[in-house]
Image (cartoon, rainbow, N blue to C red):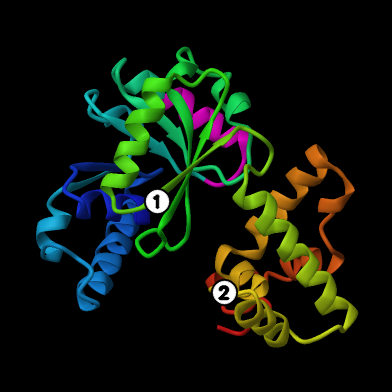
Amino acid sequence: MGAGIAHVFAAAGARVAVVESSPDAATDARRRIENSLGRAAERGKLPATVGMVLDRITVLADIAHLPAQLDLLVEAVPERAELKTSVLSAAEGAIGPDTVLASNTSSLSISELGAVLESPSRFLGMHFFNPVPASKLVEIVLARETDGGVRDRVVAWVRGLGKTDVVVRDSPGFATSRLGVMLGLEAIRMLDEGVADAEAIDTAMELGYRHPMGPLRSTDLVGLDVRLAIAEYLHRTLGERFAPPQLLRDKVARGELGKKTGQGFYRW
């Protein structure tokens, strides 16, 4: 997700700094971004050459080396609250007072993440969707503490990327994950009960309800481990209707995580 976010901002003309956890991770990140830009160029979706866009991107291996004068910092580490709060707290110490701070969380409470910050009024959620360059949506999540001017700046940036914003109040799962996970969990239950196979369930939603992608294929793309983590969080906060099916737990335990491992509900 971080590589995709860097791609879209740099392609739109911004100078971007990407922070990874080590020099090796930084090298891998730059390669992922370059590959992503190359695919976009092949499809005619890049407004400049790959080299020109890459020149706008600096990849760092230490958050302390971030330039202080940033307009926006987007945290995009894995969906674990303790990891996110640790990164956000370190980021706040490295940036200037006017930088907007955002989390790319898909379900965690923005108010709870922002509680570790000295200035929670400049913090909100920017929920990008995978793959970031192709997705048209960014869900903007406002905590009670989020300043209205910060909201307006982020809305303008999202529209400047050529994407559509939806602004929602901070609530478990927000709007998109709450609905998307519910549909995905029910599809997994239907598959486990033998109602239909994965392709039939997905085709029914794609053609019957005009979904661009069925819930099981979407789960493979998101990652079964990611979907399980979100479902467990929503189960704790919103109740039994979000209880993860055993089939989902079993697949994650076997390492069948979707597209990234080559096997999920489909073989990739």
Which residue does the image show at 68% across and 54% down from the upper left?
179
Residue where numbered disc 2 is placed: 213
* 65 in relation to 187, above or below: above
Instruction: Give the vertical position of 263 relative to 47 (above or below).
Output: below
Residue 73, x across and y down, in percent: 35, 33
Number of callouts: 2
| Percent position of residue 125, x then y | 50, 36
* Residue appearing at x 27%, y 57% in the figure: 30
Going 80% across and 66% down the picture, which residue do you hit?
Answer: 186
- Contact (CB < 8 A) between labels 2 and 1? no
The residue pinned by badge 1 equals: 164
User: Can you say which quadrant of the picture contains the N terminus?
Assistant: bottom left
The boundaries of the magenta stretch are: 78-91
Q: What residue type is labelled 1?
A: Thr
Residue 10 spot, x, y in % from top left: 22, 50
Mark 1 element type: strand
Depth check: 30 or 237 in front?
237
Magenta stretch, main secondary structure, is helix
Q: Is residue 81 magenta?
A: yes
Cα distance in 3D space between marks 2 and 1 = 19 Å
Pick the residue in front: 177 or 261. 177
